[in-house]
């Protein structure tokens, strides 16, 4: 694993060395993952929302 790069990335996010070494792999992945993209809104869902909120 590229520990040096990972520690530098953690430091840029404000995570100090002690905090970095306490992170689980799952926590690290969640911290460094990009934003979750929502699926595009389907036409039927849009029409349902328009009927519910017609303004």
Image (tube, rainbow, N blue to C red):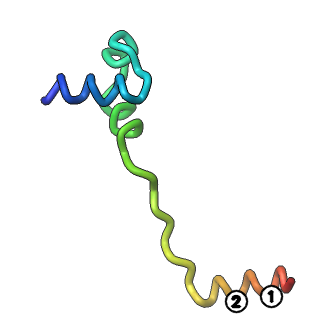
Give the image quarter of residue 51: bottom right
Q: Please indicate whether residue 53 sits to the left or right of residue 1 in the image.
A: right
Q: Quadrant of residue 21?
A: top left
Please give the name of the residue rendered at 33% of the width and 12% of the height, measured from the top-left corner: 17
**In the displayed structure, does residue 21 sit left or right of residue 1?**
right
Kindly give the residue lying farthest to the right in the view shown: 55
Name the secondary structure under disc 2: helix
- Measure the C-alpha gap from mark 2 to mark 1: 6 Å
Say above or below: 32 vs 52: above
Depth check, front residue: 22 or 14: 14
Vertically, is 19 above or below 34?
A: above
Q: Residue furthest left?
A: 1
Counting every numbered tag in the picture gives 2
Mark number, residue 39: none
Residue where numbered disc 1 is placed: 51
Label 2 Cα neighbours within 10 Å, binned few <14 / some 14-19 / many ≥20: few
Residue 1 in percent (x, y) is at 13, 29
User: What residue would you read off at disc 2?
Assistant: 47
Q: Give x and y (percent) for residue 15.
A: 41, 21
Circles 2 and 1, Cβ within 8 Å, touching? The answer is yes
Question: Helix, strand or loop at disc 1?
Answer: helix
Identify the residue at image location x=36%, y=16%: 22
Picture layout, residue 31 above or below residue 10: below
Work out whether residue 6 or residue 52 is closer to the camera in this orientation and state it. 6
Percent across and percent down for residue 12 are 37, 28
Badge 1: few (under 14), some or many (20 or more) residues near its Cα, within 10 Å? Answer: few
Residue 30 lies, in percent from the top left, at 40, 39
Residue at the farthest front position: 12
Question: Where, quadrant-wise, is the C terminus in this rendering?
Answer: bottom right
Q: Residue at x 40, y 36 (%)?
A: 31
Task: Answer with the quarter of the image where residue 52 lies.
Answer: bottom right
- Is 33 on the left-hand or right-hand side of 54? left
């Amino acid at each position: 694993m590229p520990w040096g790069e990972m520690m530098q990335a953690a430091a840029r996010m404000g995570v100090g060395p002690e905090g970095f070494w306490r992170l689980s792999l799952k926590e690290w992945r969640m911290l460094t993952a990009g934003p979750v993209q929502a699926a595009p809104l389907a036409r039927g869902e849009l029409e349902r929302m328009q009927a519910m909120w017609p303004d």
